[in-house]
Image (cartoon, coloured by chain):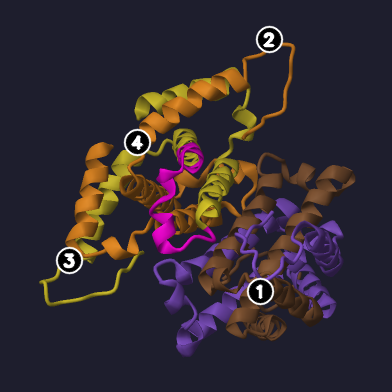
Chain colours: A yellow, B orange, C purple, D brown
Amino acid sequence: MYLLQRRLADFAAARGWGPYHTPKNLAAALSVEASELVEIFQWLTPEESAEVMADPETAHRVSDEVADVLAYLLQFCEVLGVDVLDALAAKMDRNAQRFPVRGPSASHRHSSE
Amino acid sequence: MYLLQRRLADFAAARGWGPYHTPKNLAAALSVEASELVEIFQWLTPEESAEVMADPETAHRVSDEVADVLAYLLQFCEVLGVDVLDALAAKMDRNAQRFPVRGPSASHRHSSE
Amino acid sequence: MYLLQRRLADFAAARGWGPYHTPKNLAAALSVEASELVEIFQWLTPEESAEVMADPETAHRVSDEVADVLAYLLQFCEVLGVDVLDALAAKMDRNAQRFPVRGPSASHRHSSE
Amino acid sequence: MYLLQRRLADFAAARGWGPYHTPKNLAAALSVEASELVEIFQWLTPEESAEVMADPETAHRVSDEVADVLAYLLQFCEVLGVDVLDALAAKMDRNAQRFPVRGPSASHRHSSE
């Protein structure tokens, strides 16, 4: 993944995109791409949403948006010097504390930070 | 990264979160986390946005949101069977065609799909 | 509604918020508030989502987010001189052309621009 | 505005869109439209963002997205029985308490809930 992060940085540098790639702009671009992913699912039932990859055109669209989200996430992390894999590993350690596994009789509501 | 993707899947499975983790819900959660990243920057100037890591509290918040975005992206890809690194590599090959590097005299506007 | 738009403009002016209220920042703030509304629903089934107003605390949260969305929308329109009611009326006229009512036997997929 | 809200409800009912218009889906659609507004501004400087209405094509795009945001906001409020103008007036009363106007010597950071 760091290889792709490097390749993205070189790609942007070669095109003189540096001035546009402020953290603020990259965060906005990331959220725009995430919304384009949401758009694919917005009118689907939960069941239909699980079947989107069966249609080649929608499958391509999903892959494309997922790629865009990761691209902007990596570029955002690049300009701010954040190691995204370290950040996620640290977060998962904290979440293991916050959401202990309960016994089989305990039902609990899904929750998120 | 695939190791983290596996660890996230196991984490969710152990907590019985499967029924909540439809592609539709995970795409929504991804966009919510991306917006929480935007929120950090929404009133900052471009210059201020480049300095957010200088403040330890904001730096932690940035890392935390970045981790959440990647976590939901990987969980989304897991449930739909999308290989996100392959998707990004393929997208970058297409982008290299769409945005050729121009000579030094050509100035061009930053563009995105 | 225009009264509230004026009141919002006076409120921001009295607090010296003008420099922060660029169209770019207000659009970002609007999208952040819209995501906070999404967050309320992200793990709910369609059926549960229809019942959110039955819980007073969630009902208050919904009202609050709805207010924030409208507040930023009106402030955005104020700084750019857009008449939002005119814009919507014009859009609805266009949509009446794009989505003609079909006869009872025709089923069609919901669509949006 | 309530007239437009009614007209939107009739429009959706005439096309059989009721089943798609769950609060959850409408909130997602609202956030998608808000992001389309953000997209217009994502690579612009604050100064450029203030000039978008000077270009007729961009001005049309802005109006169109603003209309979409209001349309989904009103439809969301319709299905949940929320009075959006009441919600905003109540919120502004609370904000007047939270953000008192300071004297001319006091500078303060723009803040939001």
Q: Answer yes or no: do the residues labelled 2 and 1 have beta carbons within 8 Å? A: no
Residue closer to the observer: B58 or D70? D70
- The image position of residue B55, as x and y in percent, is 45, 50
Q: Is residue B76 left or right of residue C14?
A: left
Image mark for residue B83: 4
Considering the image in quadrants, where does the N terminus of chain C appear? Answer: bottom right
- Three-letter residue code for mark 4: Asp
Q: Chain of mark 2?
A: B
Q: Earlier in the sequence, mark 2 or mark 4?
A: 4
Is disc 4 in the same subunit as disc 3? no
The mark closer to the camera, 2 or 1, is 1
Residue at 41 percent across and 72 percent down: it is C45
Label 3 crowding class (10 Å Cα cut-off): few <14, some 14-19, many 20+?
few
Q: Chain of mark 3?
A: A
- Three-letter residue code for mark 1: Gln
Label 4 crowding class (10 Å Cα cut-off): few <14, some 14-19, many 20+?
some
Q: CA distance from mark 3 to mark 2?
A: 57 Å
Is disc 3 in the same subunit as disc 2? no
Q: In terms of secondary structure, where does tag 1 sit?
A: helix
Q: Quadrant of residue D108?
A: bottom right
Circle 2 is placed at which residue position? B103
Label 2 crowding class (10 Å Cα cut-off): few <14, some 14-19, many 20+?
few
- The image position of residue B68, as x and y in percent, is 38, 52
Q: In terms of secondary structure, where does tag 3 sit?
A: loop
Q: Quadrant of residue B82?
A: top left
Image mark for residue D75: 1
